[in-house]
Image (cartoon, rainbow, N blue to C red):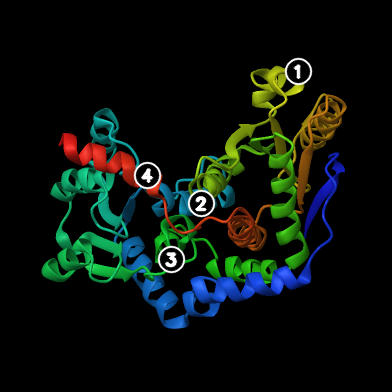
Amino acid sequence: MINFEFEKYTNINVKKICYEDYNDYLIRIKDAHSFYDLDELFEERLISKMSNLAKKIKDDNGVLVVVGIGGSYLGSKALIDALSGYFDDKGVYYAGNSLSSDYLHDLIEELKDKNVYLNVISKSGTTLEVSTAFNVLKNYVNKNKIIITSDAGSPLHTLAKENECEFLEIPKTIGGRFSVFTPVGLFPLIYAGINVMELKRGAMDAISNKDDIIKYAQVRDEFFKVQKPVEAYVCYEPKLYIFLKWISQLYGETLGKNKNGILPMTILNTRDLHSLGQFIQEGSPILFQTVFKVVKSKNDITSMNKSVSSLNSIACDATLKAHFSGDISSNLIEIDKIDEYHMGYLMQFFMLSCYYSSYIQGVNPFNQPGVEAYKKEIKEML
C-alpha cells in the first residue's frame, strides 16, 4: 500500500481532478509512447531470454559490469540498491557513468580476479562516457561475454552482429530515462535476482491511480506558480537515495526546458538535517519537498529501549511539522514497505505523472536538447 498525502503539510490548494483532461492525457500517451504497454515489455519470451542469459552468467560464476550513463543505469541501480541488503554482494558493477580515469583503473583492479561479463547499454551507441569505458574494458573480456543493449540499427547493434555478441533491443520509442522496464533495466535486475514480475504487478496497479498521478503534477505546477522553483526529494531510508537520483533525472531532463521548470534535488535524512536542515528551515523560501516515508522496516533494532525504526519515523514526522511551521510545504508519500511491488508502483507512478507534467508545461517529454548542446561542444574540442 502507498498513501499519497498532498494537503496535510502544504498551503497549496489542490485543483479539482479534471477527468476530461485525464482522458486526453491517456490518448496522448498512447499515441506518443509505447512503453506503457507493460504486457509487451514483460513479454514471456523476452523475460525467458534474459533469465536464461542471466543464469548462464551465474552458472559461470560471472560478475556483471553495467556500462551505461543516465537512464541506462540509474533505473536498475536504483532498484538493486532499494531491494538488496546494504552489504549484499549482488555481483553487479557499474562503469561508463563518468570520465574518471582513477575509477576505471580501480574497477579494473577490482575485477582482475573475477569472471567478467559486460552489459554495454546505449541507445545511440555513440555516448562518449560509455564508448570510453567500453573501449577500455573490452580488452579484459572475451567477445562471447559481451551483452549489448541498444537500438536496432545503432553502431552497437552492428558491432554485436559483427562479433556475434548477445543483443537486447531497446524499443525505439522509449528514451533512456523512461527505459527501466525495458531490457536496459530488466536484464541487470534479473541477474541480481530481482522479481521483475512483481515490479510489473506494481506498475500495472499504478496505472489505475489516475487521481494521484494528476494531482501530483498539478501540485508541482501550483508550487512553481508561487515562486517555488526547487523540489527536494527526501528519503529517510538510505537504500532509496539512488531512487531519488533516478527521479531527479526523470524530472530534470524531461521538464527543464525553455528557461522553465522545477530544479530537482535529493536529500537523505536524517543525515542531511545536519547539513541542509538549517537552510530548509530558515533559508531562502525557494523550495518545497516530496518526502518518502517507509512505514515498515524489514529489520528492526532496539537502542536505548526504543525501536530504531520508530525513532526514524518520529524524526520524519517531527521534521515535516517543523518545516510546515516554517512555511515549507511538503508532499508526503508513505510506503508500506520496500519490495518489488511497491518500487514498481512508484517508478510507473512517477513516469506517468512526469509525462502529465510535460503536458501541463507544454514541452516535449522525450527530447533533451540541452544535453545535446554540451555533447556538440565536446565533439568539436575532440
Whether the residues at callouts 3 and 1 have beta carbons within 8 Å, the answer is no
Residue type of the residue flagged with mark 3 = Ile
Q: Quadrant of residue 380?
A: top left
SS at mark 1 in the image = helix
Looking at numbered disc 4 in the image, what kind of residue is underneath it?
A: Val
Q: Earlier in the sequence, mark 2 or mark 1?
A: 2
Q: Quadrant of residue 172?
A: bottom left
Disc 4 and disc 2 in contact, CB within 8 angstroms? no
Residue under label 4: 371
Q: Please, is residue 302 above or below residue 77 in the view? A: above
Quadrant for the N terminus in the image: bottom right
Q: Position of residue 80 (x, y in %)?
A: 51, 51
As measured in the structure, the alpha-carbon distance from the residue carrying label 3 to the one carrying label 1 is: 41 Å
Q: Earlier in the sequence, mark 4 or mark 1?
A: 1
Q: CA distance from mark 2 to mark 1?
A: 30 Å
Q: Residue at x 69, y 32 (%)?
A: 287
Q: Earlier in the sequence, mark 3 or mark 2?
A: 3
SS at mark 3 in the image: loop
Residue 49: percent from left, percent from top? 37, 76
Secondary structure at badge 4 equals helix
Indicate left or right for 58 with 105 as reference. right
User: Which label was assigned to residue 174?
Assistant: 3
Earlier in the chain: of badge 4 and badge 3, it is 3
Residue 323 in the image: above or below residue 146: above
Within 10 Å of disc 1 (Cα), the crowding (few <14, some 14-19, many 20+) is: few
- 68 vs 303: above or below: below
Quarter holding residue 381: top left
